[in-house]
Image (cartoon, rainbow, N blue to C red):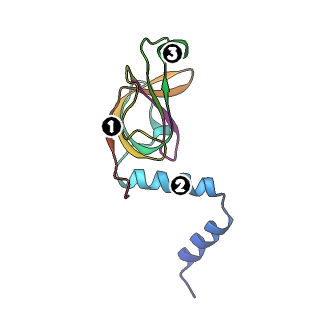
């Protein structure tokens, strides 16, 4: 018969919610690669986060000004690392090649909060290979 660990993992795969399993997979991959957990980041922290982009949208100058009181258009992406979501906002950009939903990315920047949501403005970023 199989090992107890294998049976436990198999039972979990058969009974647990697919979204929860996906969240665990993303979080595990981020930790192995050395990223911080988004849920542990606080306002003012310099963070290095790794995860998947869940959504990406382009904001016009007027929409961005209404959302955050910031001037200039930009690209807004939702980064999910398995533990929490952080918004990434690149101001003054209309498009960023490679920044698209489902893409794995590492970002570095200072964490801010707006209306309780964690945000990193103009983060440094590194796109991961689509083969991973």
Q: Secondary structure at mark 2?
A: helix
For residue 91, which quarter of the picture?
top left
Q: CA distance from mark 3 to mark 1?
A: 22 Å
Give yes or no for contact between labels 3 and 1 (Cβ–Cβ under 8 Å).
no
Q: Secondary structure at mark 1?
A: strand
Q: CA distance from mark 3 to mark 2?
A: 31 Å
Could you say which is closer to the camera, residue 53 or residue 120? 53
- Which label number is shown at residue 15? none
Could you say which is closer to the camera, residue 132 or residue 31? 132
Q: Residues within 10 Å of mark 2 (few under 14, many from 20)?
A: some
Q: Is residue 39 left or right of residue 47?
A: right
Q: Nearer the viewer, mark 2 or mark 1?
A: 1
| Residue segment shown in magenta | 78-90
Residue identified by numbered label 2: 24
| Sequence-first disc among 3 and 2 | 2
Q: Residue at x 50, y 38 (%)?
A: 39
Give yes or no for contact between labels 3 and 2 (Cβ–Cβ under 8 Å).
no
Magenta run includes residue 86: yes
Residue identified by numbered label 3: 68
Q: Residues within 10 Å of mark 1 (few under 14, many from 20)?
A: some
Whole-percent x, y for residue 24 in the image: 53, 55
Whole-percent x, y for residue 115 in the image: 57, 20
């Amino acid at each position: 018969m199989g090992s107890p660990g294998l049976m436990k993992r198999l039972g979990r795969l058969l009974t647990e919610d697919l979204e929860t399993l996906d969240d665990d997979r993303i979080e595990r991959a981020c930790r192995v690669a050395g990223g911080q957990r988004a849920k542990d980041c606080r306002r003012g922290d310099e963070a290095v986060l790794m995860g998947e982009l869940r959504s990406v949208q382009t904001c016009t100058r007027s929409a961005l000004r209404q959302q955050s009181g910031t001037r200039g258009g930009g690209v807004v992406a939702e980064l999910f690392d398995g533990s929490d979501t952080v918004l990434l906002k690149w101001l003054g950009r209309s498009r960023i090649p490679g920044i698209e939903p489902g893409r794995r990315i590492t970002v570095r920047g200072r964490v801010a909060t707006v209306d309780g949501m964690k945000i990193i403005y103009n983060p440094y970023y590194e796109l991961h290979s689509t083969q991973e």
